[in-house]
């Protein structure tokens, strides 16, 4: 099945999950239900042809209080030259687009585009306002040897 492209309102609300700025009041609520969605956001000129962030999911369902239940979330970020920068996966999360908050008691995985840094855990809270991610339980970090260089004083 080919992924369905979201309408503008849905894309704006869902991309708020990892956006670095913007007013929460300007975001609109996603529609009642979306399946197999994907959306991309692009860099500012002069790199407006390059994808900055790609968000996809299997399903988004409405919840009380203007929340959305998002299933099989995948977020990919890219450098301005098109190289993968980071990949985030979560089987399920709840997202409040107007508040710029996402959370889940379930697993989350992050990795750099080159796979040299990986982080996983259970239970997370993301806040758009200060672009912070807190992973609360069973946090595991893997750094591939040779990724960082330490120098002696």
Image: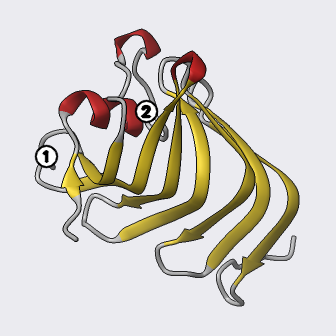
Q: Which mark lies nearer to you, 1 or 2?
A: 2
Q: Residue at x 66, y 73 (%)?
A: 118
- Image quadrant of residue 145? bottom right
As drawn, is 72 to the left or to the right of 119? left
The residue where tag 2 is placed is: 16
Q: Position of residue 147 (x, y in %)?
A: 64, 82
As drawn, is 57 to the left or to the right of 31? right
Q: Position of residue 75 (x, y in %)?
A: 44, 57
Q: Residue at x 20, y 54 (%)?
A: 4
Badge 1 vs badge 2, beta-carbon distance below 8 Å = no
Q: Nearer the viewer, residue 152 or 47?
A: 47
Asked which secondary structure carries label 1, the reply is: loop
Q: Residue at x 72, y 79 (%)?
A: 143
- Mark 1 / mark 2, whichever is N-terminal: 2
Q: Position of residue 13 (x, y in %)?
A: 38, 30
Above or below, 42 relative to 144 = above
Mark 1 is surrounded, within 10 Å at the Cα level, by few (under 14), some (14 to 19) or many (20 or more) other residues, namely few
Residue lying farthest to the top in this orientation: 25
As drawn, is 42 to the left or to the right of 137? left
Residue lying farthest to the bottom in this orientation: 145
Q: Residue at x 30, y 53 (%)?
A: 37
The residue where tag 1 is placed is: 48
Q: Nearer the viewer, residue 23 or 96?
A: 96
Q: Nearer the viewer, residue 25 or 60?
A: 60
Q: Position of residue 56 (x, y in %)?
A: 37, 56
Q: Quadrant of the N terminus?
A: bottom left
**How many labels, in total?**
2
Mark 2 is surrounded, within 10 Å at the Cα level, by few (under 14), some (14 to 19) or many (20 or more) other residues, namely many
* CA gap, disc 1 and disc 2: 19 Å
What's the mark number on residue 85?
none
- Image quadrant of residue 95? top right
């Amino acid at each position: 099945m080919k992924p369905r492209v979201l309408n503008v309102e849905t894309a704006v609300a869902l991309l708020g999950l990892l956006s670095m700025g913007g007013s929460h009041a300007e975001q609109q609520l996603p529609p009642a239900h979306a399946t197999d969605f994907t959306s991309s956001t692009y860099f500012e000129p002069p790199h407006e042809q390059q994808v900055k962030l790609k968000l996809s999911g299997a399903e988004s369902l409405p919840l009380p209080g203007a929340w959305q239940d998002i299933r099989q979330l995948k977020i990919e970020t890219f450098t301005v030259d098109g190289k993968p920068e980071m990949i985030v996966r979560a089987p399920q999360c709840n997202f409040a687009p107007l508040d710029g908050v996402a959370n889940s008691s379930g697993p989350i995985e992050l990795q750099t585009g080159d796979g040299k840094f990986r982080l996983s855990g259970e239970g997370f809270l993301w806040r758009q306002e200060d672009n912070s991610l807190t992973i609360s339980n069973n946090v595991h970090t893997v750094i591939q040897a040779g990724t960082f260089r330490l120098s002696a004083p």
